[in-house]
Image (spheres, grey):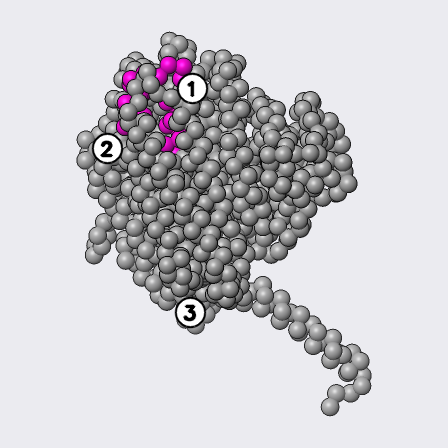
């Protein structure tokens, strides 16, 4: 039993409210997004179905009422279909006439006016047909066997008949034999194609009357197809299979690990060396220069990586041309896989050494002066002091810095993206795989990003990131185990 | 030492904060012209002749439509739309619409003036214009999904290749739903056929066209001796003359990617994706020939170490190449550096005509405008006015270099070709272009083609021309296979 005093101090209602509030925040901002992005990895998410627009709801609503509507307006719809069919058939006749006119045209007898009149007749009729088909009252637009040929016929006429006619005839004062030959060569086959397509549309329009239930079936089928297209589907492990059924992602994994192996030691060496040098009181104005050395931290990464890219631009970049001038060695980050990889390492070291340096300097500062003086008294040389006294004392903070910076290398993204988007492209081969074309320096995270933004394959992208997260998790757990369970931390 | 470390960190943090503040200031500065509450809305151009439409339509007209002057064109419209227009013209109805673009500052400035002109002509409609919307497609989709009809675009513009995705998702409104056959028939006559068709998707009219863009041959006349090559053999002569890697001069500047090399593919009869037949043609005979031609006949005169936009553009700007194949978007930059340029179609190859991709800038009405009839009509009116007004189109052409697609503006351009050589040059070059596919499926095509092309470039640079040419077929077969697999899902 809680006392009255306790209730006053810790009112239950407020406590419940706070708990509820934090739960809501936790679920909506933490649990849900994580769960959702994991779910996406198991779906066929694409630009179309990941965030379906209002169309999906319209379709679902239409589906429930469509059969009833089509049944109730049967006579009207059939009447309109017949009207449309008549117009289509008339159009085909006019197109026949157009073919004959163009086929038999000579520079002397060609009449641009006659062709334009036929064009007006064709366009007028087809517009009428179009308005019947797309009308909400007939719903003929739900029948793909009508819409598809009609749509194609209209485009064929616009692009491959009227446009060349305009170009070759309309703006010419004098039509030459050559113009006409060209016209016949380009336009006549297109007119023919349009006629065939219109014939298909005409047949489908006729089918509406002769087999009305068939039309209802096709309309329902089309609605179902469109709903299906806008719906996210669960595909199980398919995305993960796709990740590993060609060598691109495995190679990306290999390249990322290689990057960790090369960049982490370089970062550590650079950071520790600079820290030791700049802790020495012998360096003039070391506080100021030390501050300057930390600058890579302060500059936005977008700016600094772009600057590095410009410095190494083939032929024109300051550094690439200097290297070529002095050493006669051509640096080509857009062509050579390993040149680009080397540049990633340079930039990564440049970006990360301030971190390692700061950690090291803090550790160095904590070494009691007496130890160093004792070493000096015992006659140890500088290198000996460094190896036997200083290094063991700063090992723990250094290990932490290494762990953290390894995580950064595993997630390399901005550097490859900004330097050459993970290029150059080449044939990627790994044992056990058939070679395939891909980008040779596409690090894991960049690979996932490109699948989403270039290919709009969000499912595959989410699967990639799930793999990346698992790798990081394994890495973190391994360190946790080694540090705390095996007691490394207490060494 | 122990005390100096935190100080350094504080100093670094302070520096960071300063940089961020400076960045925010810069960004807000740049965004300034887009705020619609600018106090000086006076248009510098005289408003177009707007003879008030007579109340009595001609007797031959069916009663269901009335003729209305919009911009500089006469269009038959439904009577309730006609009523609405007269009301907003008198200011009896007040309605606000949001208009979004994702454009460069110099373009935004001109469009902003057009918007002001529209507002002064139709005082009942207030247009909230946002010129530089980041991530526009996603922003519009998100707004519509969230049902935020007040703060989402009601009208927006982009190249027509978004049509498929936006229409299939129901984010944009089919005008065929609200405009009768007569209106569409009249509209059709106003625009070039290619441009009008680009707004039509699955028989519905979704967008109204106002400009076209695509790539053409741009030459520095001081380097070509005043000539603009019309045939590839002529271009080759010029390229040979200038190619000298020792002096870092090249025969041609050309950003190389699947979009920019497409004219070579079409010249040989190839294609990437034909949405009419739902066919992938990445390894078609024409595509193979086109890529081989690029590697064997064009690359030898180019700087292939860096084929990116920036590197190739600066080669041309610095007078290190006589010609570049590029689009109108780079012209303002080029004109700052190169005094005399001429623009023409990409040269014919043995009588075969290269057709570049073209993008037609359309105005779309979004679902966010549909709920409120006044807002919908105001949006449609704005789209009609913007695409049908010859004065506005001329202003956009003169001041921002947009290439018109309205028939009367094209006639004007043709008659004044000498006055507008650049726009006229692009217009002629793009008259015979291939509109980019509207289908969402195209997103699955670009990636594999880009990889194949990038791989050819790597082989060309590392192992030379012969090996690169020999690799074309295999690489394209692989790209074709990848695309077909992606289509299957």
Asked if marks 1 and 3 fall on the same chain, the answer is yes
Subunit of label 2: B
Distance CA(mark 2)–CA(mark 1) = 33 Å
- In the image, farthest residue toward the front: B59
Q: Is residue B355 above or below residue A261?
A: above
Residue count near mark 1 (Cα–Cα under 10 Å), binned few <14, some 14–19, many ≥20: few
Segment tinted magenta in the rendering? A159-186
Decide if residue A397 is in sight here.
Answer: no
Residue picked out by circle 1: A171
In front: mark 1 or mark 3? Answer: 1
Q: Which mark is residue A481?
A: 3
Q: Which mark is residue A2?
A: none
Give the image location of residue B89, x and y in percent.
73, 35
Decide if residue B226 is in sight here.
Answer: yes
Is B48 left, or right, of A325 in this rendering? right
Which of the 4 image quarters holds residue A238? bottom left
Residue count near mark 3 (Cα–Cα under 10 Å), binned few <14, some 14–19, many ≥20: few
Is residue A171 covered in magenta?
yes
Residue count near mark 2 (Cα–Cα under 10 Å), binned few <14, some 14–19, many ≥20: many
Asked if marks 2 and 3 fall on the same chain, the answer is no
């Amino acid at each position: 039993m809680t006392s009255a005093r306790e209730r006053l101090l810790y009112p239950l209602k407020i406590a419940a409210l706070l708990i509820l509030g934090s739960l809501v925040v936790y679920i909506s901002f933490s649990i849900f997004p994580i769960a959702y992005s994991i779910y996406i990895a198991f779906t066929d998410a694409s630009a179309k179905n990941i965030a379906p627009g209002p169309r999906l709801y319209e379709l679902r609503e239409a589906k429930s009422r469509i059969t009833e509507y089509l049944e109730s307006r049967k006579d009207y719809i059939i009447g309109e279909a017949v009207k449309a069919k008549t117009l289509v058939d008339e159009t085909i006749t006019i197109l026949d006439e157009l073919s004959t006119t163009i086929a038999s045209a000579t520079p002397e007898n060609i009449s641009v006016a006659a062709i334009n009149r036929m064009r007006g007749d064709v366009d007028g009729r087809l517009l009428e047909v179009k308005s019947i088909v797309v009308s909400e009252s007939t719903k003929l637009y739900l029948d793909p066997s009508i819409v598809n040929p009609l749509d194609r016929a209209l485009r064929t006429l616009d692009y491959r008949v009227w446009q060349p006619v305009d170009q070759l005839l309309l703006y010419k004062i004098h039509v030459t034999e050559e113009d006409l030959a060209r016209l016949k060569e380009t336009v006549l086959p297109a007119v023919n194609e349009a006629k065939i397509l219109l014939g298909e549309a005409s047949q489908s329009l006729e089918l509406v009357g002769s087999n009305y239930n068939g039309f209802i079936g096709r309309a329902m089928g089309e609605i179902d197809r469109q709903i299906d297209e806008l719906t996210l589907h669960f595909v199980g492990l398919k995305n993960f299979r796709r990740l590993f059924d060609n060598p691109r992602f495995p190679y990306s994994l290999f390249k990322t690990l290689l990057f960790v192996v090369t960049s982490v030691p370089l970062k550590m060496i650079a950071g520790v060396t600079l820290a030791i040098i700049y802790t020495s009181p012998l360096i003039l104005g070391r506080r100021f220069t030390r501050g300057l050395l930390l600058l890579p931290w302060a500059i936005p990464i977008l700016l600094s990586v772009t600057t590095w890219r410009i410095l190494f631009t083939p032929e024109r970049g300051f550094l690439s041309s200097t290297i070529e001038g002095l050493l006669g060695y051509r640096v080509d980050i857009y062509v050579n896989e390993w040149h680009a990889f080397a540049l990633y390492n340079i930039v990564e070291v440049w970006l990360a050494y301030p971190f390692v340096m700061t950690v090291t300097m803090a550790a160095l500062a904590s070494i009691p002066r007496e130890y160093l003086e004792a070493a000096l008294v015992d006659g140890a040389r500088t290198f000996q002091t460094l190896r036997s006294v200083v290094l063991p004392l700063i090992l723990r903070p250094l290990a932490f810095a290494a762990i953290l910076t390894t995580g950064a290398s595993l997630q390399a993204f901005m550097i490859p993206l900004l330097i050459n988007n993970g290029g150059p492209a080449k044939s990627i081969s790994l044992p056990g795989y058939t070679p395939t074309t891909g980008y040779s320096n596409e690090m894991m995270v960049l690979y996932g990003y490109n699948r989403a933004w270039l290919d709009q394959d969000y499912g595959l992208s989410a699967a990639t990131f799930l793999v990346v997260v698992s790798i990081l998790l394994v890495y973190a757990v391994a360190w946790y185990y080694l540090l705390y369970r095996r007691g490394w931390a207490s060494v | 030492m122990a005390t100096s470390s935190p100080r350094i960190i504080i100093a670094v943090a302070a520096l960071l904060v300063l940089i961020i503040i400076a960045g925010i200031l810069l960004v807000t500065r740049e965004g300034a012209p887009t705020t619609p509450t600018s106090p000086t809305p006076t248009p510098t151009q005289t408003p177009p002749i707007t003879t008030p439409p007579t109340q009595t339509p001609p007797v031959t007209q069916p009663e269901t439509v009335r003729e209305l002057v919009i911009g500089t064109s006469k269009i038959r419209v439904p009577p309730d739309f006609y009523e609405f227009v007269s009301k907003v013209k008198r200011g009896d109805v007040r309605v606000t619409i949001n208009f979004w673009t994702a454009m460069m500052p110099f373009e935004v400035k001109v469009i902003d003036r057009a918007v002001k002109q529209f507002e002064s002509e139709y005082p009942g409609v207030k247009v909230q214009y946002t010129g530089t919307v980041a991530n526009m497609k996603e922003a519009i989709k998100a707004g519509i999904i969230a049902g935020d009809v007040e703060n989402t675009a009601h009208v927006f513009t982009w190249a027509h290749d978004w049509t498929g995705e936006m229409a299939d998702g129901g984010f944009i409104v089919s005008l065929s739903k609200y405009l009768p056959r007569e209106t569409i028939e009249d509209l059709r006559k106003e625009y070039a056929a290619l441009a009008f068709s680009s707004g039509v998707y699955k028989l519905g009219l979704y967008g109204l066209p106002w400009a076209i863009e695509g790539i053409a041959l741009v030459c520095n006349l001081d380097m070509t001796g005043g000539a603009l090559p019309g045939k590839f053999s002529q271009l080759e002569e010029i390229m040979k003359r200038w190619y000298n890697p020792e002096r870092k001069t090249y025969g041609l500047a050309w950003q190389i990617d699947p979009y920019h090399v497409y004219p070579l593919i079409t010249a040989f009869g190839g294609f990437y994706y034909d949405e009419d037949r739902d066919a992938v043609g990445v390894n078609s005979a024409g595509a193979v020939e086109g890529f081989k031609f690029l590697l064997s006949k064009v690359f030898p005169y180019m700087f292939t170490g860096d084929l990116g936009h920036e590197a190739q553009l600066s080669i041309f700007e610095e007078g290190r190449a006589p010609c570049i194949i590029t689009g109108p978007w780079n012209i303002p930059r080029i004109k700052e550096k190169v005094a005399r340029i001429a623009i023409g179609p990409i040269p014919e190859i043995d009588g075969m005509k290269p057709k570049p991709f073209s993008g037609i800038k359309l105005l779309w009405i979004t679902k966010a405008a549909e709920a409120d009839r006044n807002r919908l009509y105001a949006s449609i009116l704005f789209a009609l006015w913007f695409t049908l007004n010859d004065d506005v189109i001329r202003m956009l052409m003169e001041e921002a270099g947009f290439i018109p697609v309205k028939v009367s503006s094209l006639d004007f351009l043709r008659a004044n070709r000498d006055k507008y050589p650049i726009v006229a040059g692009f217009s002629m070059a793009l008259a015979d272009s291939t509109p980019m596919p509207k289908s969402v499926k195209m997103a699955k095509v670009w990636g594999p083609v880009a990889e194949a092309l990038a791989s050819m470039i790597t082989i060309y640079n590392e192992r030379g021309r012969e090996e690169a040419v020999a690799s074309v077929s295999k690489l394209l077969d692989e790209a074709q296979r990848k695309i077909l697999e992606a289509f299957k899902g």
